[in-house]
Every structure is written in C-alpha cells, then in structure tokens.
Image (tube, rainbow, N blue to C red):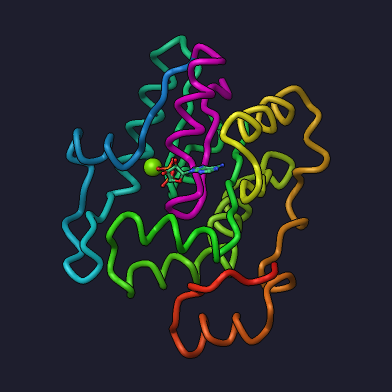
Amino acid sequence: MNRILAISGTPGTGKTEVGQLLAKRLNAQILELSDLAKQKQLLLGRDQERDTFIVDVDQLRHFLVDLARKADERYIAVGHFADEVPVEFLELIVVLRCNPVVLTQRLLQRGWTHEKILENIQAEILSECTAQAMTRHDSSKVFEVDTTSLTLEEVVEAIEAILSGKGNQFVVGQISWLHTLDPKLLHQIMEERTLPLKPQKA
Ligand SMILES: Nc1ncnc2c1ncn2[C@@H]1O[C@H](COP(=O)(O)OP(=O)(O)O)[C@@H](O)[C@H]1O
Ligand SMILES: [Mg+2]
C-alpha cells in the first residue's frame, strides 16, 4: 500500500528531470503518466485545438490500481495530472512550482504556441495543480516546492526531506504568485493575455 509517490506541476516545472533523479536515488520505477497513457492507449482522443491527447483518467486510475496491487516496487508517478493516482496507493504528492517569468522562458524553449504557453502560465498563477491535488487527497499528503531558484539536486533533496517527515516548510499555502508578482504584470498575463517576457522582480 501507499507505494506511489506523485510529482505534479505545470509543464516545465521540472517533473521529468526531478522524477528521474529521484527514481535513481530511491531505486524506484518512474511512471511518466502521459507516455504511459499513450503506450497503453488510455486515451479518449485528441484535442486538436490544444494539440494534445485527452487522457482517459478513469482507465488510467484502473491501470495504476492494478499495477500497485501486483508489483512490489515503489513507483514515482510524474505528470501534470499525477493527482489521479488512486488515494489508497498515494504515498504523497509533491507539486513543483515555478515563477511564471522563469517558466515562460522554459516553455518558449519548447517551441509551443503563445496560446498554449499562456494557458499553462495562467494555470501556474492560479495554482491549478495544487488545487487539484487538494481536491482529491488529504491535505496532509500534499506538498509544494518552489523550484525557481533551486537546482534539480536541491529539488530532489527537498522531496527526500518531505519523505522523511521533515516537510514542514513545504506544506501548501506558502507559494502564491498572485501575492508575489507585480499586479500590473498579473493583469497583463490574466487579462491582456500577454506573456511575461521581461525580467521582473518577483
Ligand atoms: N530546478 C531547475 N533549474 C533549472 N532548470 C530546470 C529545473 N527544473 C527543470 N529545469 C529545466 O526545465 C525544463 C523542463 O523540465 P522538465 O523536467 O522537462 O519539466 P516537466 O516534466 O515538468 O515538463 C528542462 O529543460 C529542465 O532542464
Ligand atoms: Mg515532463
């Protein structure tokens, strides 16, 4: 039981790289949820407008239940919908956060469209992944790490601290871009739909 550690977060916050490093350190199996959904055809179709696959989350949950029941391994489930890990198998869920200004730079490097980047930056500002995690899971199992000025190694160390019961500083409620970003910049992102391209004081 409780064999799946979930790492959630807006695209670009470092889930894949952190997950891989952590999996090595903990000798765990990584489950990259969007790859898994594609490989196992746990899909409802394609969202043309967003240029993504629509994951069949019910099927995904069934798949994870079967996997966790059968296998005797520890898993790290990585993905922006990692909150879908069934409650009974969730060890804990860590949501990686990143300052929207820095996150924009990372997403621009992916060559995504303006609209796709904007949608994700707005989701980060509204703490959507954290809200999802809090909706589905007991709040004592949900943590957030601000990765903005941490190295990958430091993010992994933060998660290890959380796992060893020293996660007090990572409880939900410490990170709010709504409170820390310049209100003008927030207005531009949320209302005028422009991306935060210039370096700004956080
Ligand atoms: N803490 C960090 N510091 C600097 N760069 C990072 C950090 N975390 C991730 N990155 C970089 O950001 C990009 C996105 O990371 P990735 O692991 O693919 O994110 P995700 O899986 O959440 O979409 C990669 O180029 C990665 O090297
Ligand atoms: Mg990834």
Q: Residue at x 72, y 31 (%)?
A: 162
Q: Residue at x 42, y 19 (%)?
A: 29
Residue 168 located left or right of residue 33 = right
Q: Residue at x 63, y 87 (%)?
A: 184
| Quarter residue 201 falls in | bottom right
Residue 51 located left or right of residue 112 = left
| Quarter residue 101 falls in | bottom right
Quadrant where the C terminus is found in the figure: bottom right
Q: Residue at x 34, y 46 (%)?
A: 58
Indicate which quadrant contains ligand 2. top left
Percent of width and height locating residue 74:
50, 17
Percent of width and height locating residue 194:
44, 82
Residue 100 in the magenta stretch? The answer is no
Residue 177 located left or right of residue 196 = right
Span colored in magenta: 1-27
**Figure check: 173 above or below 193:** above
Instruction: Judge by depth and name the residue closer to the eye, 142 or 159.
Output: 159
